[in-house]
Image (tube, coloured by chain):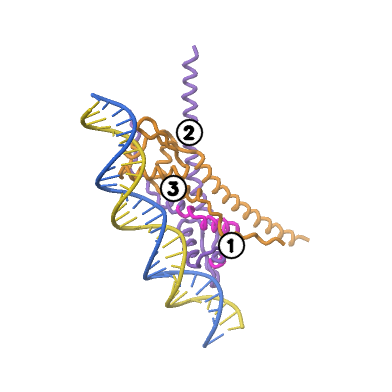
Chain colours: A orange, B purple, C yellow, D blue
Amino acid sequence: MVVDQLTPIPERDVELDRLFQALSDATRRDIVARVTAGEYSVSGLAGLYAMSFAAVQKHVAVLERASLVTKEKRGREQIVRGNHDGLQKARHLLDQFEMIWRQRASRIADILAEDDERDLP
Amino acid sequence: MVVDQLTPIPERDVELDRLFQALSDATRRDIVARVTAGEYSVSGLAGLYAMSFAAVQKHVAVLERASLVTKEKRGREQIVRGNHDGLQKARHLLDQFEMIWRQRASRIADILAEDDERDLP
DNA sequence: CTGATCTACAACCATTTGGTTGTACGATAC
DNA sequence: GTATCGTACAACCAAATGGTTGTAGATCAG
């Protein structure tokens, strides 16, 4: 009998840490939405929010480290664009959780089915 | 000409903040996976990780506040279960981003189509 | 060239986070 | 009853976070 191989230390996935941490701030989620729809310079973004340029700059840096956004120099501006890869990685994890949920649901259904069989002659 | 109605203050969605912040830690993601697959008591969970009971207790509390997990008292134990609602809320946001991405993609396709028309007689 | 614009980055500060230990209390086992 | 188990919670600590101001380097406009 193979006992569930318990991993005492959960896989330290720094990439996922950064991804979800990056998405845990409303300003950053807003930036992601905007630069996914179109292009913005950093100062273009900074103009949208009631905070300093440097603060927005930091938010963009957090998003870039999380692969949710890319920066590309164009003249003296830095153009920020949405990065689909990061989004997909986050979606993938949630999809896995969804699968676990469904497996559990179907396992319960199986058990109920077994009970039904027991009831039958 | 209607200039894009800029929302200077991005919608402060504390629920989403908590959701993604809760998912930004590997131990908590592991807990979510486990309690979504089956039931665990808090001390049952605590036995899995190389940290104190109180630390795991805090992680569960964070997950509970984020609606990713529910606790239910059973005897002297506290049973932790996965909460599908929280997961779906997080998935919904990422799906919205995915939609924005696709809209942008199709908008670009439209522009290319217009260019093609110009090329035609 | 000069001045304005866009960006980068350091230094600083208050608050939050993720961990610890210690204490207290209800439920269970003996 | 008493001892033990599972939990809750407070107090504490180091590090990270989210913001600020200030300084300095590129790039563009006139």
Q: Residues within 10 Å of mark 2 (few under 14, many from 20)?
A: some
Image position of A49 with respect to B87: above or below: above
Residue wearing tag 1: B39
Residue wearing tag 2: B103
Over which residues does the magenta segment extend? B21-44
Q: Residues within 10 Å of mark 1 (few under 14, many from 20)?
A: some
Amino acid type indicated by mark 3 = Ala
User: Which type of secondary structure does the marked residue at label 1 adopt?
Assistant: loop
Image position of A36 with respect to A116: above or below: above
Residue wearing tag 3: A22
Determine if marks 2 and 1 fall on one subunit: yes
Residue B6: x and y in percent read 34, 38
Q: Nearer the viewer, mark 3 or mark 2?
A: 3
Inter-mark Cα distance, 2 to 1: 41 Å
Inter-mark Cα distance, 1 to 3: 30 Å
Inter-mark Cα distance, 3 to 2: 23 Å
Q: Tell me if label 1 and label 3 are in contact, CB under 8 Å.
A: no
Residue A45: x and y in percent read 35, 38
Q: Subunit of mark 3?
A: A
Instruction: Verify whether residue A8 appears in magenta.
Output: no
Q: Subunit of mark 1?
A: B
